[in-house]
Image (cartoon, grey):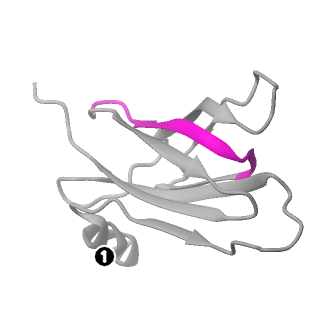
C-alpha cells in the first residue's frame, strides 16, 4: 500500500504522457492505454474509478469505438487493442470531480495517463 501511495504522490499535479513502442514497420492501427487514478487528498489509489474513451476521430469507419473499464483495487487500469485515433478520456469516481481531456492513441503505441481526482466539496 505504501508503494501505491508513493506512486500516487509522484503524480500529484502531473498529467504524465509517455508514448512508447512507436514502430516504423507495419502498423496494426491499434494501441493501448494504461494508468493510475489517485485521490488528491492522501494520495490514495481510487479503486473502482471509471475510465471511459469516447471516439472523436479514428482510422476506422466503425461508430462503436467507445470503450470503458474500471480501475482495480490499486487504482490501476488498462485498455488493450484500442483503435488508433483521437478520444475524449473521462475518469470519474463516486464522490470525486470527473476529469476529462482529449488523448491520441497511437498505432502500435502505448499511452500512460496518471490522474489525480479532487473530492467534491460538500
Tell me the quadrant of the picture where the C terminus can be found: top left
| Residue drawn at x 34%, y 59% as measured from the top left | 15
| Residue drawn at x 39%, y 71% as measured from the top left | 4
Q: Residue 116 location in percent, x, y?
A: 30, 52
Q: Quadrant of residue 31?
A: bottom right
Q: Residue 51 location in percent, x, y?
A: 52, 39
Tell me the quadrant of the picture where the N terminus can be found: bottom left
Q: Residue 117 location in percent, x, y?
A: 28, 45
Residue 74 seen in render = no
Residue behind mark 1: 6
| Residue drawn at x 56%, y 49% as measured from the top left | 104
In the displayed image of the protein, which residue is found farthest to the top? 63
Residue 96 shown in magenta: no
In this rendering, position of residue 110 left or right of residue 80 = left
Q: Give the vertical position of 18 relative to 75 (above or below).
A: below
**Highlighted range, magenta:** 80-95
Q: Determine the secondary structure under disc 1.
A: helix
Q: Residue 54 location in percent, x, y?
A: 58, 29
Q: Predominant secondary structure in magenta? A: strand
In this rendering, position of residue 37 left or right of residue 35 = left
Residue 81 shown in magenta: yes
Q: Give the vertical position of 51 relative to 11 (above or below).
A: above
| Residue drawn at x 86%, y 73% as measured from the top left | 25
Please state which of residues 26 and 65 is positioned toward the viewer in this rendering: 26
Amino acid at each position: 500500500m505504501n508503494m501505491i501511495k508513493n506512486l500516487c504522490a509522484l503524480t500529484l499535479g502531473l498529467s504524465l504522457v509517455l508514448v512508447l513502442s512507436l514502430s516504423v514497420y507495419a502498423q496494426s492501427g491499434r494501441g493501448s492505454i494504461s494508468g493510475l487514478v489517485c485521490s488528491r487528498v492522501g494520495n490514495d489509489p481510487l479503486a473502482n474509478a471509471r475510465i471511459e474513451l469516447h471516439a472523436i476521430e479514428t482510422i476506422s469507419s466503425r461508430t462503436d469505438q467507445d470503450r470503458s473499464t474500471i480501475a482495480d483495487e490499486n487504482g490501476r487500469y488498462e485498455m488493450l487493442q484500442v483503435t488508433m485515433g483521437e478520444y475524449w478520456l473521462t475518469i470519474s469516481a463516486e464522490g470525486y470531480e470527473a476529469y476529462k481531456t482529449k488523448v491520441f492513441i497511437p498505432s502500435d503505441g502505448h499511452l500512460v495517463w496518471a490522474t489525480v481526482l479532487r473530492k467534491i466539496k460538500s
